[in-house]
Amino acid sequence: MIEIRLEPSLADCIETIAKREYERVLGILLKEDREDRQLEEELELLRVFLESADFGQLRSLSEDLLLDGRRVEFIVRSTDKPPGYEIEVKDHRGA
């Protein structure tokens, strides 16, 4: 199971953070001269997440917490059930 942690802020929403992580992983894979199965799986998980997530709902959920001064972390995990991932939201109080 692959797990990716994404931490949005008031300046950068969850979609922006996910896109940056996708680009970062893709860049690493393109530079390497060998296969890296873990990174390939991370890239695929991010692709599916970016194509199917309801970012309006995720932004709404995180913005309220961020405006309250909390730190929010989205944990995206691969799964065999559609859409291919599950999301856990962690609200870090007092961060």
Image (cartoon, helix red, strand yellow):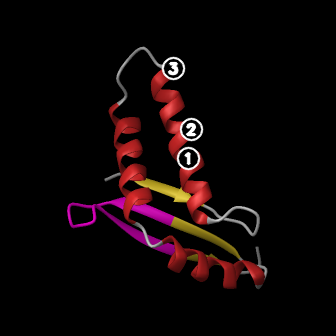
**Mark 2, residue position:** 24
**Magenta-colored segment: predominant secondary structure:** strand
- Please tell me how crowded label 2 is: few (under 14), some (14-19), or many (20+) other residues with Cα within 10 Å: few
Cβ atoms at labels 1 and 3 below 8 Å apart: no
User: How many residues crowd around disc 3 within 10 Å: few (fewer than 14), some, or many (20 or more)?
Assistant: few
| Alpha-carbon span between mark 2 and mark 3 | 11 Å
Q: Is residue 67 left or right of residue 45?
A: right
- The C terminus, quarter of image: bottom right
* x, y percent for residue 74: 53, 67
Q: Secondary structure at mark 2?
A: helix
Compare marks 2 and 3 and give the one earlier in the sequence.
Answer: 2
Place of residue 67 in the rendered image (x, y in percent of width and height, measured from the top left):
76, 82
The location of residue 37, given as percent across then percent down, is 32, 33
Question: Do the numbered discs 1 and 2 sit on residues whose CB atoms are within 8 Å?
Answer: yes
Q: Report the residue marked by disc 3.
A: 31
Q: Secondary structure at mark 1?
A: helix
Amino acid tagged 3 = Lys
Considering only vertical position in the picture, is 56 above or below 12? below
* Amino acid type assigned to the residue bearing label 1 in the image: Glu
Residue designated by label 1 = 21
Q: Is residue 78 magenta?
A: yes
Q: Is residue 92 left or right of residue 47?
A: right
Q: Residue at x 62, y 77 (%)?
A: 62
From the viewer's perspective, is residue 95 above or below residue 60?
above
Residue 20 shown in magenta: no
The residue type indicated by label 2 comes to Arg
Q: Residue at x 56, y 38 (%)?
A: 24
Q: Is residue 75 above or below residue 32?
A: below
Gap between marks 1 and 3 measured at Cα? 16 Å
Q: Please give the name of the residue rendered at 51% of the width and 80% of the height, measured from the top-left corner.
A: 57
The tally of labels here is: 3
Specify start and end residues of the magenta stretch as a single range. Answer: 75-89
